[in-house]
Image (cartoon, rainbow, N blue to C red):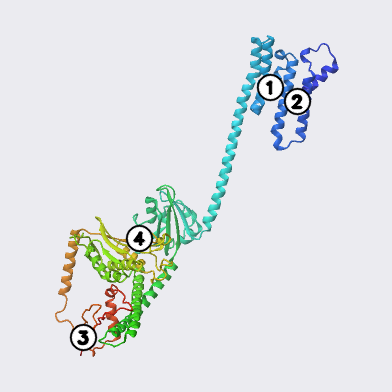
Amino acid sequence: MVAAAVIALYFWTFFTKNSNISESLTVNLIAVALAGATVLICFISYLWSPKNTIFPMTLIIYLLLEATVAALVISTGDTTSPFLTLWVLVGVFAGVFGIWGSLPILIAVGTFVANKYISGGLTNEVIIIIAFSSLLPLIASLIIWHEKSGKDDSNNDEKAYQNLANKLSEVASKSEVVINAIGDGVIAIDNQGIIQLINPAAQTIIGWGKQDALALNYKSVLQLVDQKDEALDDINDPIRQSLNVNQQIRTNSLTLMTKNDKKLTISLVVSPIGEIGAGVIVVFHDVTKEKAEEREQAEFISTASHEMRTPVASIEGYLGLTLNPQTAQVDNRARGFILKAHAAAAHLGRLLQDLLDVSKADDGRLSNNPKVVNIVTFVRDIVQGLEQKATAKGLTLTYKPMPNNSTERHIAPAYSVNLDNDHIREIVDNLVENAIKYTNKGEIVVDVTGEDDRVIISVKDSGIGIPSEDMPHLFQKFYRVDNKDTREIGGTGLGLYLSRRLAEIMGGRIWAESVFNSGSIFYVEFPRITSQEASRLTEIEAVKTGQETDKIPINPPEPILFTPEPEKTALTSEPVNPVPRSASLTPEEIAKYVVQQRALARQQPVPQANARPKSISIPVRGPQ
């Protein structure tokens, strides 16, 4: 519009030829040409202007306008020009284009001031007019349009924030879809124990609706009880534990009471969120059916193992009688076959006993009869019973607290425990036998150390070691390390699992450290009692034993008389007191005796096929 007005003024003064018109209103050809170019580009940009060229086209139009007004002002009296207001107006909009719009004005003003200075026309009046007509509008323009630009940036930030919020909302929506699609129950709980999220699977399992469960304390919705149907306290509550220690808690032994008072056995995992006490995510699912199937399997294994022990023990007993030269005569070749059969029967008997013990441990039927014992001397006796097996394999078995080959006087420490002696024997026996089994050469060291409240038994070997990927599964049921070094070594994967369960039943724990091809160290930790407590419990046990002795009848029923065979060394071929050949045994009597002596038999080394056998002591009924 300004450029069109300049063109119109030019033609008006050109065609009217009015001599009364002042020269200050006469437009020169330079200004008209610049104004014409401005109008033309404006018309073109109005008809066609791609989006990516809007700013450059607008800047070109503005620069042409600046040049048009500058030429108009210079040609009509510069500081006294009646068009000086247009120059002020142009300067006000310079800040829209930033440095690109402001710099040409500064250059033009600088050039004008230099010319005035050279020609001697730079007066105070001229300086004031330049300041008010050029510099002040330019400064005001930069301030105004900079603030506007800041607002635009603020709008851009707001848009960016809105876009980010939309993206987060989209991610949250996807997460909600995933959580809702999970078949396990998921509940989010804050640090105050208030439920913040519950997915449909959790609603189905516990019988609570979403609107009813949200904003309630988790104990009102997740009603967890222990195996005795008693409510959990804060010490046993896995959710409270996870909030307190900021660690993941897993459990498979809790029962959930639903809203309709239905009992469900659940597998529950509680995982902390963020910093300690910030909140937890609870994931659980119903394992009632799986637990029932496990119980059925355990009952089947228990029943089968119990029923099979008698015939296996009978077979083992008859094979023992066959190997006894006082009851049977066989040649050396047949003796080798019978030795192998006897070893296989003994192995099968141990396997059945392990299966029976595992099934009892799983369903809580395994007995726990604590008795005070000095763990150092007790473990020494176990180790001594296995020395022959280690020696037969060329290994050195050392008991560190009381070494046999020491020439110096040695004072062994005394660590007392009040635990089931049979369970301790089973664990130590298993660990030392494993060390012998998986060590081809070198030494096995058994040690006992202790602190004020615990005793630690360690079994260190120089065997084949355990790969790191197998370590987390080492104490699982039926798990065996599978590689070229272990495939030739027999085993069922029950020994370490049973050892772990026995240790847990006695309030202890078991763990291992190993480097593949560099040996292993197995540790068993038991709770320790003080010497005063050990003395007190021993006295109580002695009193109980005396009372039970007093209850024995004076004339008890006459027992069946057995004449045990005297103990012989491995090289003895004939017993000192031969067993009468007329003695006879029933299969039931043989099986009963073998089962009763299983614990002692398991400590003895398995006879080798090329070794001369011991005479096996079997009780026999004397002549009637």
| Amino acid type, callout 2 | Met
Q: Dot 3 lies on which element?
A: loop
Closer to the chain start, of discs 1 and 3, is: 1
Which one is earlier in the sequence, the residue at label 3 or at label 2? 2
For label 1, the residue is: 89
Which marked residue is nearer to the observer: mark 4 or mark 3? 3
The reply to whether residue 485 is visible in this rendering is yes
Front position among marks 1 and 3? 3
**SS of the residue at dot 2?**
loop
- Residue at 29% across, 78% down: 595
Q: Is residue 288 left or right of residue 566?
A: right
Residue position for label 2: 1
Q: In terms of sequence position, does the residue under pointer 2 or pointer 4 come before the other?
A: 2
Identify the amino acid type marked 3. Pro
The residue type indicated by label 4 comes to Ala
Q: Are marks 3 and 2 in contact (CB under 8 Å)?
A: no
Instruction: Identify the disc placed on residue 156.
Output: none
* Quadrant of the frame with the C terminus: bottom left
Q: Which residue in the structure is indicated by mark 4?
A: 512
Residue 115 picture quarter: top right
Using the numbered discs, state the Cα–Cα distance from disc 4 to disc 3 in whole angstroms: 49 Å
- Using the numbered discs, state the Cα–Cα distance from disc 2 to disc 4 in whole angstroms: 91 Å
Residue 399 screen position, x and y as percent: 25, 63
Q: Nearer the viewer, residue 83 or 343?
A: 343
Local crowd at mark 4 within 10 Å, few (<14), some, or many (≥20)?
Answer: some
Q: Nearer the viewer, residue 462 or 584?
A: 462
> Badge 3: how crowded within 10 Å, few (<14), some, or many (20+)?
few
